[in-house]
Amino acid sequence: MLIKPIHTTIFEAGDSLEDFIARFIPAVSENSIIVVTSKIVAVSQRRIVSGGSAEKVLWIKKESEKYIKTKWCYLTLKNGQWCANAGIDESNSQGGGLILLPKDPYRDANKLRKKLLKLYRVKKLGVIITDSRIFPLRQGVTGVAIGYAGFQGIRNYIGLNDLFGRQIMMTKTNVADSLAAAAVLEMGEGSEQIPLAVITGVSRIAFTERVEKKELQMDPKDDLYRPLFQRKITNSSKKGGKK
């Protein structure tokens, strides 16, 4: 697998994301995957709001499906994933605003992919929109896919045999997040100015026209970490503000 990070100019609010990508990635080969940070997707959609700390809390609650206040931040459920502060970010925000996550990352990835298929004149192309997350009992952030299109995000081993002929009962590989993590490692988290990457040479990727939006999501009752969330969780204000 080869990851090519793409250094760019600063992406301005309201700029065309498709034109920006075409400018810095003029061509791709078949079976490539284009990685785009959620920040420039959000900026292209003008998902930027102003406000201080009080307004930020209001936006966190508005953007979350559920939230728990911790001593560091709000632990929030957003688009089926637990994350800090509903993914709202102040870093690398030109003008000092709050950058929200894209409105619908899977839809955005699919729309972008359709445009890029025509631009590059290829048949098999993937798109990943990335963000960063922290995980229980692990230091540091890791890249994840908050939306993707053009390939299956899960590789299922259930029912297959392992090296010694034993049937595999539970294992699935999270392809989308694995690719996102590798790409974000190369793209960086600070002032690198690398919001794009191209992944090539990935073995056994199942390219597809239709992605099951919830294939990476899990029913909370089946989640290994469920005992950590047994405490009372506050619903977001858009769900009626119940506590």
Image (tube, rainbow, N blue to C red):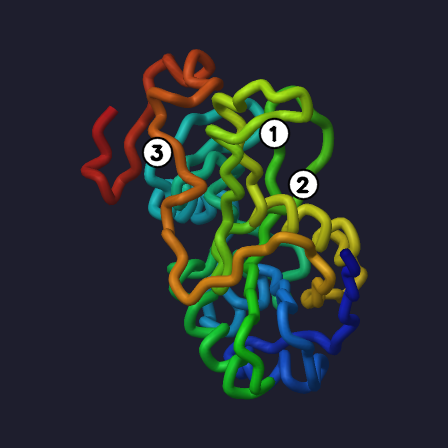
Q: Is mark 2 on a helix, strand or loop?
A: strand
Question: Percent position (x, y) of residue 3?
Answer: 77, 60
Task: Kindly identify the amino acid type of the residue bearing the numbered disc 1.
Answer: Phe
Cβ–Cβ below 8 Å for labels 3 and 1?
no
Q: What element carries label 1?
A: loop
Q: How crowded is mark 2: few (under 14 residues within 10 Å), some or many (20 or more)?
A: some
Indicate which disc, 2 or 3, sits on the residue closer to the N terminus. Answer: 3
Q: Distance between the residues labelled 2 and 3?
A: 22 Å
Cβ–Cβ below 8 Å for labels 2 and 3?
no
Cβ–Cβ below 8 Å for labels 1 and 2?
yes
Task: Kindly identify the amino acid type of the residue bearing the numbered disc 2.
Answer: Thr
Q: Distance between the residues labelled 1 and 2?
A: 8 Å
Query: In the rendered image, which quarter contains the N terminus?
Result: bottom right
Residue at left 45%, top 41%?
A: 216
The answer to which image quadrant residue 95 occupies is: bottom right
Question: Percent position (x, y) of residue 130?
Answer: 58, 55
Tell me, yes or no, if residue 56 can be seen here.
Answer: yes
**Residue 117 position (above or below residue 242):** below
Q: Which of the two residues, 187 or 45, is positioned nearer the viewer here?
A: 187
**Residue 218 position (above or below residue 37):** above
Q: How far apart are marks 3 and 1 (CA)?
A: 18 Å
Q: Which of the two residues, 23 or 98, is positioned nearer the viewer here?
A: 23
Task: Kindly identify the amino acid type of the residue bearing the numbered disc 3.
Answer: Lys
Indicate which disc, 1 or 2, sits on the residue closer to the N terminus. Answer: 1
Residue located beneath label 1 in the image: 135
Indicate which disc, 3 or 1, sits on the residue closer to the N terminus. Answer: 3
Question: Percent position (x, y) of residue 39?
Answer: 58, 61
Residue located beneath label 3 in the image: 66
